[in-house]
Amino acid sequence: MGIFSRKSDTATVAVPAQVDPALAALTGTYTIDPAHSSICFTVRHAMVTNVRGTFSKHDGTLELNGSNPAASSAAIDIDTASVDTGIADRDGHLRSGDFFDAEAFPKMSFRSTSAEHRGGDIYRITGDLTIKDVTRPLSIDLEFQGAATDVYGNERVGFEGSTQILRSDWGLTWNAALEAGGVMVSDKVKLTFDISAIKAAA
């Protein structure tokens, strides 16, 4: 939301930008629809190719304030055992103590601490990501994809976004050296989000 200035003979008067009624109407509590949302990751494997995976079980809520985006917030929980790369043995390794230790730490979580409108349809949400017993700050840039009422009468909003992390920052340090040099799994991980959320009834 911008602030515009108007000059006068005696002072400069700040005039707040008018709130878009369509955005203001989005204000409310939304539940993430896991059937129409995805939380995915991409990581370099053996220095030559990418492995892609997803977490099939997750839930969360969005508190959106269309009049004041900075007052918006998000909370997401992800089942670590739901990791799926399409290879059963690899998924089992990811669930083990070498990586997520899903039995001891069944959830990873994100809790926002601030939100910012970056211009146009772009927003940045910053918060705390907890994996295993490590909590560190994380910022995610999201693009608002629009709002619509589905065939069942649900009011929906959509967001797409991405960010990058170093898995070692959360203590996920397992690796194996390659004979030709380099390591089996890169430290850098790209995270992508495709979120559809349903507005709670008033």
Image (cartoon, grey):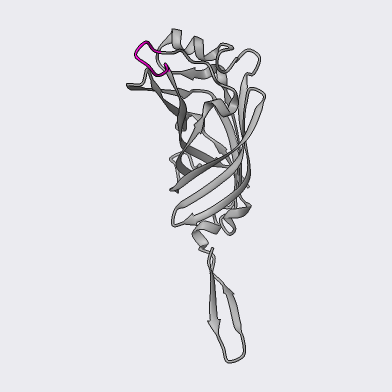
Q: Is residue 21 left or right of residue 101?
A: left
Q: Label the magenta part by its dominant secondary structure.
A: loop
Relative to 62, say whether 54 is above or below. above
Quadrant placement of the N terminus: bottom right
Residue 35: image location, x then y, percent: 47, 29
Residue 156 seen by the camera: no
Image-quadrant location for residue 69: bottom right
Relative to 159, say whether 58 is above or below. above
**Residue 49 is a magenta residue:** no
* Of residues 48 and 85, the one drawn nearer to the viewer in this rendering: 48
Q: Residue at x 58, y 75 (%)?
A: 15
Residue 27: image location, x then y, percent: 58, 52
Relative to 147, say whether 60 is above or below. above
Residue 94 seen by the camera: yes
Q: Residue at x 46, y 43 (%)?
A: 158
Q: Is residue 170 left or right of residue 184?
A: right
* Of residues 110 and 176, the one drawn nearer to the viewer in this rendering: 176
Residue 194: image location, x then y, percent: 45, 36
Q: Which residues are magenta?
A: 178-184
Q: Residue at x 53, y 40 (%)?
A: 198
* Of residues 27 and 124, the one drawn nearer to the viewer in this rendering: 124
Furthest-top residue in view? 89
Residue 59: image location, x then y, percent: 57, 30
